[in-house]
Image (cartoon, grey):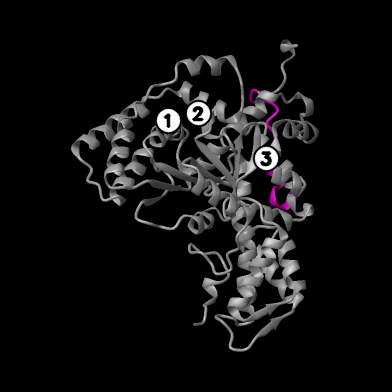
Amino acid sequence: MKDPLKKVFGVSKDLLKSYVTRQIDNDFKDKYELTDHHMVIFGETKVGKTSLRKKCIPLTDDVIVVDCTKGISLNDIYVQVLYKAGVEVTEKITKALEESTKLRGQISSNFLEFLKLKIMGEQSNKEQVNEVKKPYIPNTLSVMVSNELDKVKKTTIVLDDFHYLSLVEQYQLSFDLKMFYQNGIRFIVLGTKITSGYFEKFNGELTHRIDYIDATNWTEDELKEVADKGSICLNINISDSVINYFVEASNGIISVYQGLLADLCIKFNIRETQDHRLTIDDLEAAKKIVSSYWEKMSGTYFIKIKSVAGGGRRRKLQLYYYITRIILYSDQTIMRQGFPFQYLYEKLQEMHPLGTSINQGALTTVLSHIDELQIDKEIFPKVYTYFDKRLSIVDSDFYFITKHLPNSEINNLLPPHEYVIDLEDPEDGLKQPTLF
């Protein structure tokens, strides 16, 4: 049987035949088979989280998969779970759904701000006061869901793209997870860049009941093995010089790397397994493929970058613009690690025309709203997130885009004359002499 190209290289919803087992596959398998813990697979978009889950968790009768989408609620998830389990949504469950929706709708703006501070890693007296006033949302609905799942022998729930849930819904899920764990229902949660201990920030009782797997990193050897496995399937040989170039040019991003390999095959009319072994050793063609791939992708990302830089209501000091410039001018190593608050603050003081007149509160304010700014501007997937006092990239393609963006082009992308500061009416963010 010949393998079609789309089953070997490229970006696909299905497991490709060039799939490579990494150390994290073994780590995940051990945690999955040797514990009864909930599990979280995290990392930027398009780094292989879903493929890892599909490889390690076969779709058996006891597994239910729910794909989260923009605007989804926890109640929507529970309804999907019941539907996929073949459970009828009774009047009792419907009433519980309505009651939980009503209670979450009554959560105060102060508590929402508290949740945001908790995720950002900010500490304040206000946070401590609000924590005392945190709302009580009974887990009546999740208990019903758990009982129904137990009746039909469903033991594992997979939540893909968990990051589409709002903070309030994430908060409620963290408490439901404790109850599900006690009842023998296991959740496998997939989401963009968070860190170990994320759910414990909401509910400390999840400690030792949930494990985290970081799916982000791919080694050079693992990427090269992808090309080797795919080449065997297609009966081709891609030269070391081309593979090494693609590894470096893709910036280690598996989705980009797979896309480049697929485009290379298309360039040489390799659409399925070859009858006779074909060798590809054309570095110039590979360079053109990378250039073309970058051109196709960059336009979309430039729109996202400019949209964030433009800011929203908080734009008098143009801080989103200067944060964007700091990101674009930063080294890839720093970008991969995320931008600590202090790093951004020091760079902002160096770059911003008002220099040391900018206080930390102004930066905190814009960073704390960068996630909702992207939601308001319908930037999906998001490019950035602010979590635990660190601004992180959550769309892995951004690393590829910025790697090939010359510094000399940044001013063309973000013309300074379009981001003029209104000095006559500055927002709160300048240091006030009366404070010293």
Mark 2 or mark 3, whichever is nearer to me: 2
Where 434 falls versus 93 (above or below)?
Answer: above
Residue type at numbered disc 2: Phe
Q: Which stretch is magenta?
A: 411-428
Residue at image mark 3: 321
Q: Which disc is residue 202 wearing? A: 2
Q: CA distance from mark 2 to mark 3?
A: 32 Å
Q: Dot 1 surroundings within 10 Å: few (below 14), some, or many (20 or more)?
A: many
Residue at position x 66%, y 26% from top?
Answer: 362
- Closer to the camera, 429 or 16? 16
Q: Left or right: 245 with respect to 270?
A: right
Q: Dot 3 surroundings within 10 Å: few (below 14), some, or many (20 or more)?
A: many
Report if the CB atoms under discs 1 and 2 are less than 8 Å apart: yes
Q: Position of residue 17 (x, y in %)?
A: 55, 69
Q: Position of residue 212 (x, y in %)?
A: 56, 42
Residue at image mark 1: 175
